Amino acid sequence: MGALDGRVVLVTGGGNGIGKECALIAAREGAKVVVNDLGGGERGGDEGSAGPAEAVAAEIRAAGGEAVSNSESVSNMKAVKGMFEQAMDSFGALHAVINPAGILRDTMFHKMADADWDIVIEVHLRGSYNVCRATIEHFRNQNDGAYVLFTSTSGLIGNIGQANYAAAKLGIMGLSRIIAMEGASKNVRSNIIAPTAWTRLIATIPIKDEAAATRMKAMQAALKPEQPARLAVALASPAAKDVSGQIFGARSETLELFSQPRPVESLTAPDHWTVSSILSEALPKMAAKFTPLSGVGGGQQQQRAPANA
């Protein structure tokens, strides 16, 4: 018995990296899979090709599973509705969406082009909205559904050079949380994963010196995409029916559960706060509990670290 026996799963970004492993592992766990991948270039979001998605679907079928392919973009709502319809036409059902599809357009914020902001928000945040909005009513009507969306420590913690990516990924945290809250009465779950894995997107980050090359080589050897994919498939399983609204991390063989923002200090003025008293009293009292500026690499002056999804 597999964890997804009898289930139908849509996997976006399923032609390479984490998405590919999600599709293959879901199929091995008994799911019928719609494998979606735009088939763009290494940076993602470039010219498309049906090849990667179909290659993964063919691999699933060759192993005795059931799969169909789709090469449309998650950033297009009409296309995403087509993915849902394809699942229903091909398999008569849809029970889960796993959505690791993504791209990178890394640059320092003061140098960022509008186009690089827009496309990252479109693919990550709008794409997550699209796959959820296109399927949420179906999940609610059948009283059963699971979303596994992908965030990043670049958004949860911060990372220099990734303002567009971080903004989109932190937005996905809010989206997932509300879907989980609103879906609880209808057995609709949503969780997010901040993965650390070697993917084509990480491989596009410039290597500036020998030390960086050594670090990247070690990362490629240690951080396999199937590691976060196993967590994604587990969260999509009905066996995880009591798990919703959570933020998980997957780093090598380490699984992490992230805290979620809550107040850490509260100060009340005896009368009312003024600009002067906020500066002289409130901020100094809160200072010990400020979150440091260090990002995922651990230092304020860090170089841009690889993106995590």
Image: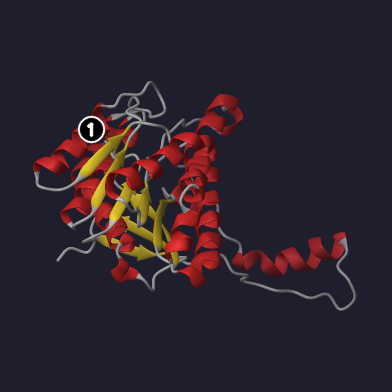
The structure residue drawn at horizontal position 86% and vertical position 59%, both measured from the top left corner, is 275
In-front residue for pair 39/196: 39
Tell whether 255 sits left or right of 245: left
Is residue 101 positioned above or below 41 on the image?
below
* Residue 279 picture location, percent across and down: 80, 60
Is residue 138 positioned above or below 208 on the image?
below
**Which part of the image, by quadrant, shows the N terminus?**
bottom left
Tell whether 123 sits left or right of 59: right
The structure residue drawn at horizontal position 29% and vertical position 53%, both measured from the top left corner, is 8
* Residue 91 picture location, percent across and down: 28, 49
Residue farthest to the top? 47
Residue 106 appears in the figure: yes
User: Which residue was labeled with disc 1?
Assistant: 54
* Residue 111 picture location, percent across and down: 58, 26
**Which part of the image, by quadrant, shows the C terminus?**
top left
The image shows a total of numbered marks equal to 1
**Structure colour scheme:** secondary structure
Tell whether 20 sits left or right of 151: left
Tell whether 24 sits left or right of 72: left
Residue farthest to the bottom? 270
Residue farthest to the left? 63
Label 1 packing within 10 angstroms: few (<14), some (14-19), many (20+) = many
Kind of residue at badge 1: Glu
In-front residue for pair 63/113: 63
The structure residue drawn at horizontal position 9% and vertical position 40%, both measured from the top left corner, is 62
Is residue 236 positioned above or below 265 on the image?
above
The structure residue drawn at horizontal position 23% and vertical position 50%, both measured from the top left corner, is 32
Q: Secondary structure at mark 1?
A: helix
* Residue 303 picture location, percent across and down: 43, 38
Residue 113 appears in the figure: no
